[in-house]
């Protein structure tokens, strides 16, 4: 009889809420600059975001547009009518005493995004909504000399446009949740609507996790996890929480509906299979909070007509999935390679520029060069970028230079072995590959006379391997080829060289 | 209709607004008039009319994404009862 593992007894149900700071110049409802990252506290503050009496908010057109763009990219409906509401709560991170948000009539809803965990089929994650609201002030909690605790408020972040993307409870594993977040970040960055950087705090994620017996249609009690500040934190926190809830259920206990915070490095409750960290209870959730939502009377509602939506749709950049599919069909790239090339918009643009430089007019030639460009980008180029901790955008290698270097290999001017040195030099200096080949004396040795002389020298200098080979030890030729290649500084065609060497040995 | 002075004082304290005795009298009258106006509104027949939260029927009032100046920090801090190192200081609030 087989034992039942937790994975087969319970099904994990995950929904994510992601808060995304939008890349606007101005705050959501006032003229203060939204670029507060390096500003001293309380220097991006005006009567509106400070909530002085009698002020009037005016919404940022760009933020509305960014939200609709995101909705379209996530296959959402864009309702013809949207409005803002006040979400009331007693916490001084917004001095108004409420947050302006969208409650029952958001700007986008009912979409989906496709995610794929490696080795599994792609799955759709439903998008409940992407709505627009404002970010809050930053609070720092302190304790005075007398032991009295207090909070310090910096209002710079207060009122920065914030988009909340809410998924349906459609994810079934920590891996899937991570893939979803990576996909969402990629799409947001492609469109340039957000930096979407978790560590910088402009891309923040809360997870709702519940377990239910396999086959059950009803959801279990939902636990909300907060304070996850990196992709690995999201992954580890979900893994931890699934394990915790499994043990609770197995022990016959009831899962409390509550909010828990992820705390890194606290203990290893479940042993070394799990990353250090725990989720810790923060507060119980007494059903839905009473936020006393009501329509924001200071903001006239939005009507969004179809022509406006279509104009925004037409201006969207080609998104990663579409680009990947096109790279596969147009250039015959594998799914894996195409995925690597569309990882960022800059990478994909580099590839496309290099491909546009191809001079070979035949289809076969074009495909061949495209694949070589992809191989160099994924291989040596990426390796050098990583080793030098450089971004593609800051690299000295241009798409035309990469293509020019590959052309030199294809024309037989340099060997594949020399190309590595040439490329490293292009990477270092940004110079013209043809000039670098000349400077470094790396032109391929064309004549077999020259190769012949070198081979003779190597045969003379290495009597032992030569004797071995002649005695029938085929392996010995490898050493002699290696020595000869070293003599030529990699400038000889290895196949030609090997052929000449064998002829001489067998003569 | 006139509001009780105590009610005005209470509202003023909630709004952190300091009022003189004369102002309390003035606002007691004005606030009373505003509240009294709801009696007038209550008398209007609204059968068959869609509820709205907007009186002006404006739509799509938006500003271009251009940042303007913020207040000087000392002005901001002067408005707060307590500050510390450029921050507003409040009593600890447990979420």
Image (cartoon, rainbow, N blue to C red):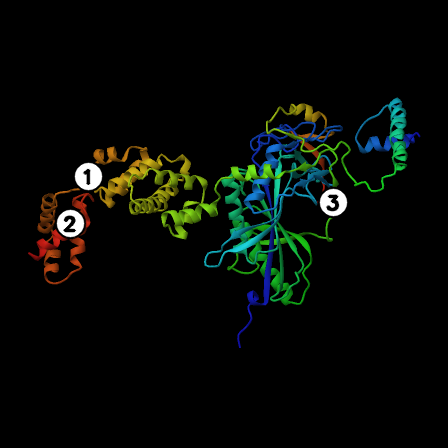
Residue at which label 1 appears: A443
> Could you say whether the residue bearing mark 1 is in a helix, strand or loop?
loop
Name the residue nearer the viewer: B12 or A415.
Answer: A415
The spot of residue A444 in percent (x, y) is 18, 41
Residue at which label 3 appears: A291
CA distance for labels 1 and 2? 15 Å
Q: Judge the density around disc 2: few (<14), some (14-19), many (≥20) Cα neighbours within 10 Å.
A: many
Residue at which label 2 appears: A497
CA distance for labels 2 and 3? 79 Å
Are tags 2 and 3 found on a single chain?
yes
Q: Chain of mark 2?
A: A
Q: Dots 1 and 2: beta carbons under 8 Å? A: no
> Could you say whether the residue bearing mark 3 is in a helix, strand or loop?
loop
Residue B5 versus residue A461 in the image, above or below: above
**Which residue is most to the left?**
A507
Q: Dots 1 and 3: beta carbons under 8 Å? A: no
Q: Is residue A499 left or right of residue A369?
A: left
CA distance for labels 1 and 3? 74 Å
Q: Quadrant of the C terminus of chain A?
A: bottom left
At horizontal 15% and vertical 49% (from top left) the residue drawn is A497
Is residue A188 visible to us here?
A: yes
Q: Judge the density around disc 1: few (<14), some (14-19), many (≥20) Cα neighbours within 10 Å.
A: some
């Amino acid at each position: 009889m087989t034992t039942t593992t937790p994975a087969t007894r319970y099904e994990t149900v995950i929904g994510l809420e992601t808060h995304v700071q939008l890349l606007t110049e101005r705050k959501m409802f006032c003229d203060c600059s939204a670029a507060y990252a390096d500003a001293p506290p309380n220097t991006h503050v005006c009567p509106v975001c400070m909530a002085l009496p009698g002020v009037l908010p005016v919404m940022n057109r760009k933020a509305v547009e960014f939200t609709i763009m995101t909705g379209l990219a996530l296959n959402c409906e864009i309702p013809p009518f949207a409005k803002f509401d006040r979400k009331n709560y007693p916490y001084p991170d917004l001095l108004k005493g409420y947050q302006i948000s969208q409650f029952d009539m958001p700007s986008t809803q009912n979409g989906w995004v496709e995610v794929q965990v490696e080795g599994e089929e792609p799955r759709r994650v439903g998008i409940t909504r992407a709505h627009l609201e404002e970010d809050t002030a930053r609070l720092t909690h302190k304790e005075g000399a007398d032991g009295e605790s207090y909070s310090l408020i910096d209002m710079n972040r207060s009122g920065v446009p914030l988009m909340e993307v809410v998924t349906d409870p459609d994810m079934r594993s920590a891996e899937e949740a991570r893939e979803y977040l990576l996909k969402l970040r990629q799409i947001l960055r492609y469109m340039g609507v957000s930096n979407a950087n978790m560590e910088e705090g402009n891309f923040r994620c809360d997870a709702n996790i519940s377990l239910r017996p396999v086959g059950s249609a009803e959801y279990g009690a939902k636990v909300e996890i907060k304070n996850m500040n990196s992709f690995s934190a999201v992954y580890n926190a979900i893994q931890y929480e699934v394990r915790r809830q499994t043990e609770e259920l197995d022990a016959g206990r009831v899962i409390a509906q509550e909010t828990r915070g992820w705390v890194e490095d606290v203990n290893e409750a479940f042993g070394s299979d799990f990353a250090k960290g725990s989720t810790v209870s923060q507060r119980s959730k007494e059903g839905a909070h009473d936020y006393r939502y009501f329509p924001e009377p200071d903001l006239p509602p939005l009507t969004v007509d179809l022509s406006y939506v279509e104009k925004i749709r037409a201006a969207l950049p080609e998104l990663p999935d579409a680009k990947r599919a096109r790279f596969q069909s147009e250039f015959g790239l594998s799914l894996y390679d195409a995925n690597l090339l569309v990882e960022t918009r800059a990478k994909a643009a580099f590839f496309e520029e290099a491909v546009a430089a191809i001079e070979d007019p035949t289809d076969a030639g074009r495909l061949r060069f495209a694949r070589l460009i992809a191989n160099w980008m994924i291989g040596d180029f990426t390796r050098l970028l990583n080793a030098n901790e450089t971004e593609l955008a800051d690299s000295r290698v241009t798409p035309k230079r990469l293509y020019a270097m590959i052309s030199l290999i294809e024309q037989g001017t340099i060997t594949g072995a020399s190309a590595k040195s040439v490329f490293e030099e292009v990477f270092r200096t940004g110079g013209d590959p043809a000039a670098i080949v000349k400077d470094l004396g790396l032109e391929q040795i064309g004549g077999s006379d020259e190769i012949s002389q070198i081979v003779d020298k190597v045969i003379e200098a290495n009597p032992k391997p030569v004797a071995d080979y002649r005695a029938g030890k085929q392996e010995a030729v490898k050493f002699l080829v290696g020595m000869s290649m070293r003599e030529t500084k990699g400038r000889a065609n290895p196949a030609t060289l090997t052929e000449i060497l064998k002829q001489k040995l067998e003569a | 209709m006139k509001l009780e002075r105590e009610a005005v004082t209470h509202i003023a304290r909630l709004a952190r607004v300091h009022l003189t005795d004369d102002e309390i009298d003035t606002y007691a009258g004005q606030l009373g008039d505003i509240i009294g106006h709801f009696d007038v509104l209550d008398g209007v027949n609204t059968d068959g009319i869609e509820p709205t939260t907007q009186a002006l029927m404006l739509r799509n009032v938006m500003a271009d994404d251009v940042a303007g100046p913020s207040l000087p920090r000392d002005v901001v801090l002067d408005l707060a009862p307590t500050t510390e190192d450029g921050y507003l200081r409040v009593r600890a609030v447990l979420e």
